[in-house]
Image (tube, rainbow, N blue to C red):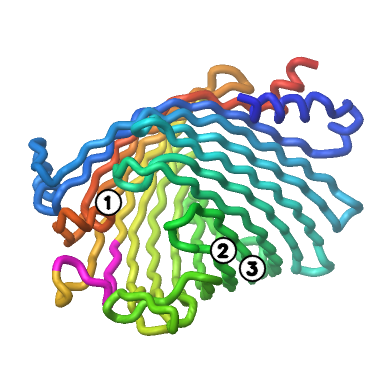
Amino acid sequence: MWYRLAVLTLVLALPPSAHAQWDVEATAFTRVGVQDNVFKSPDQLLQNQSMLGTDSLVRRDAIYQHGGDIEVERALGARHEVAVEYDAALQHYTTFSSQNEREHDLALRYAHDAPGPLTLQLEVDRRWNRSVGTSVLGDELTRLFSYRHWEMNPQLEWGLSEMASLTLDYRRRWRTYDTQAGLAPLSYNDHRLQLISWLRFREADRPQWVFLQASVREKQYRDYQARDLDGQQDPSHPTNTLRYASLRAKYNMDVSDTFSWGIGTKLRRRVDAFKGYYNYQYARLDGEIEWDVRPSTTVKLEAKWRHYRYDEKSAATPEEPLRYNYVDGALHLTHRLRPYLHLVGRVSTDRRISNVGDVSRRTRRSYAVHTVTTGLRIDVERLYRQMR
């Protein structure tokens, strides 16, 4: 609750002259939901059996979410712009006893519209996250799991034409985890370089766009030891270093002013620099449909399939590599109650089908998660203007 009050107080405290000089956007939200987690063996999940065997587990959570964000921008002359953005969120699960997650994110951004087709942008981000609760997949084990990180993100955009642009994006991150004894030391540094292109065009009076992205990334753990091909760690091993290469493509079409659809794909390869224990190949297909049923009501449907295939990490037997197939779907509903107030709802199902059936290897087994959430989203700046 205090997150929403802080955002509202900050916006309302700005004098009218500040609102005229700065572009202010602020929102707050509150949501409540119910989540069912069902962990089954692969055969049970594939056959969608309602009967649960002795090796299955059901966990039901009630979820409460509160948060808000505020973004303040100001133009400094014709070619310079500065912005500050702050986000805060609280998520509470009722798993077993309790589980809470808090996150704060503060970002500073500077943009320069250089003469010609170039735009330069630099963003510095500071994030804090703290999670207290049970361990994953149903084991009743209290834990403290938190992190904080710095992120620096310079970006260069080149406008090739009114319809096409090319962006070179570099991201450097330093993340430090504070975990209690017995949990893995996951602190890391990483850097990522991306090349992004946009192409926007119209055909038969229908706006369309194509998005292409190619990226490389290296993630260096500071204390976490690498594993050999048997999955074993040893003090003589170096700290773990993972390298990624990925390609992403997406296409979208606005069929009308009220209906649009899109489809996308992604390929990624991860390589373990030590022995290859963490190597995997990843493929993804996704699609979405968005429909403004009424001027005040929007419905959005999303579907996604993902496939992971590990080179060395084993499933039930060392001869069989670990494989995951994820099938996710979600239905979103947004209804405008007032110019500043929206009712939001979401129904989703997420399934992982694994080729691991061993009861003792629960973190690699199949599961299904079904979630229903509903809540309110408030446009605080619009509310402020209406109150004046």
Amino acid, disc 3: Arg
Is tag 3's residue or tag 1's residue first in the polypeptide sequence? Answer: 3
Is 85 or 136 nearer to us in this picture? 136
- Real-space Cα separation, disc 2 to disc 3, in angstroms: 23 Å
Q: Which residue is labeled 1 in the image?
A: 327
Secondary element under disc 2, as helix, strand or loop, is strand
Q: Is residue 307 above or below residue 69?
A: below
Question: Where's the N terminus, which quadrant?
Answer: top right
Q: Is residue 309 magenta?
A: yes
Q: Check the image and name the residue furthest to the top.
A: 387
Is 373 or 355 nearer to us in this picture? 355
Q: Which mark is residue 364?
A: none
Q: Residue at x 22, y 58 (%)?
A: 361
Q: Which residue is labeled 3 in the image?
A: 172
Q: Residue at x 65, y 37 (%)?
A: 69
Which range of residues does the magenta coloring cover? Answer: 307-316
Is tag 2's residue or tag 1's residue first in the polypeptide sequence? Answer: 2
Secondary element under disc 3, as helix, strand or loop, is strand
Q: Is residue 318 above or below residue 262?
A: below
Horizontal and vertical percent for residue 87? Answer: 64, 41
Q: Which residue is labeled 2 in the image?
A: 198
Does residue 87 appear left or right of residue 372 in this picture?
A: right
Amino acid, disc 1: Val
Amino acid, disc 2: Trp
Is 188 or 113 nearer to us in this picture? 188
Horizontal and vertical percent for residue 210? Answer: 49, 61
Q: Main secondary structure of the magenta part?
A: strand
